[in-house]
Each structure stands twice: as C-alpha cells, then as structure tokens.
Amino acid sequence: MAITINEIEGGMGLLVDGQLYFVTEYHHVKPGKGSAFVRVRLKNIKTDAVLERTFRSAEVLEDAALERRRMQFTYAAGDEYHFMDQNTFEDIVIPKELLGDGVKYLQDNMEVETILFKGQVFKAQVPTFIIAIITEADPGLKGDSSKAGYKPAKIDTGASIQVPLFINPGETIKVDTRTGIYVERVKK
C-alpha cells in the first residue's frame, strides 16, 4: 500500500529497495525555503542494519503492515523451534537463524515477541531478562562477596555465562539475554 511522508510513524514497517524495515525515528522538517521532507532512521528486520534516509514530500513510500504477536516456545527439533501462537493456538516453526543468539536462552513455555509480515515470521526476540538456575559452576568461596572477579558457569538452558565468584550451583540468577551477562541473584 502506498503512503505519503506525512503518514510515517514510529514502529511502522516500510519496504525500501525491496528490503523490509521498521521506522525507529523520524523527523518532519519544514525549512524556510523549499518543500518539506522527512528524515527517517530505519532498521532492517532481518539483519538489524540501520539505514538513514531522507524522503521528499512528493515521494510515495510502500507501507509494510507488520504484525507483532506473542508466541510460546513448546519444543525444539534440530534447527527448528516450535512455538504456539497465543492468539490462534496453531504450531509455528521458527528456524534457528531468526532467533539468533537468543536461542541459547530459550526456556520451556517461554513467551517470545515475533514480527510477522504477510503471515510469515521475520523476527523472533526472547525477553530481555530471564530467570535461570546455575547448573554447573565451581563452588563459591567464603568472603568473595565483592565484585572481585568472575568465573564460568552454565545455566539451565545450557548457555555458558560469567558469574561472580560467590555464586554457587543451584542458585537462581537474572541474566541479560542481549549480552549474556549476570545481572543479580534472585530470591525464590
């Protein structure tokens, strides 16, 4: 569907040069001389590459109706991950590539945010923070309660992360899935 520059909004999808983008920022500019234009910052849905473009008022853009849906992780089979659509309860298969590094943090029944275009999943994103249990780590040393250093540990999803020296196996922690960094200890 064709739209004008006046209809651009944050979060909307656009097809630019055959690629699917969503608008992260936009600024309508009306200079003293000349016609108005819009400066837009776009993010590629597949590659996360950022593109900055300027569109003149006479240009017509192609709108891409993006749909956001929450889906629940059910199980994995090889490089395919099965999710249940929370609205229709149908089984959706999402390949490993669309999940990216987030695949290391998938937990049973975890809800992920997906972006669909024409019924096809283009992006799946795990929550920013997860609560996980330490399954493997060297025992914590008494007195190492400061942030003196880190040690490797494994969490219940199978991912390896760095945790402070005072963390013991069996403890529950909060992990930032964007960076894979320990955030804090969680009390049950």
Image (spheres, rainbow, N blue to C red):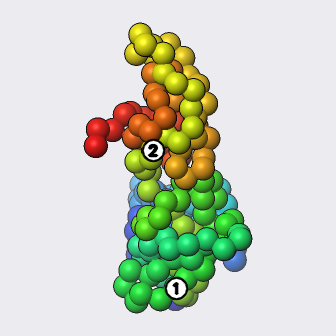
Q: Residue furthest left?
A: 188
Residue on which the image places disc 2: 133
Label 2: how many Cα within 10 Å (few below 14, some 14–19, many 20+): many
Q: CA distance from mark 1 to mark 2?
A: 28 Å
Mark 2 residue element = strand
Kindly identify the residue that appears in the image at 52 percent across and 85 percent down: 91
- The disc at residue 91 is 1
Kindly identify the residue that appears in the image at 57 percent across and 37 percent down: 136
Q: Nearer the N terminus, badge 1 or badge 2?
A: 1
Q: Is residue 36 visible?
A: no
Q: Is residue 147 visible?
A: yes
Locate residue 52: give its quadrant. Answer: bottom right
State the image coordinates of residue 87 (x, y, percent, origin top left): 37, 85
Q: Is residue 188 above or below residue 87?
A: above
Kindly identify the residue that appears in the image at 47 percent across and 29 percent down: 168
State the image coordinates of residue 169 (x, y, percent, origin top left): 49, 35
Kindly identify the residue that appears in the image at 47 percent across and 89 percent down: 90
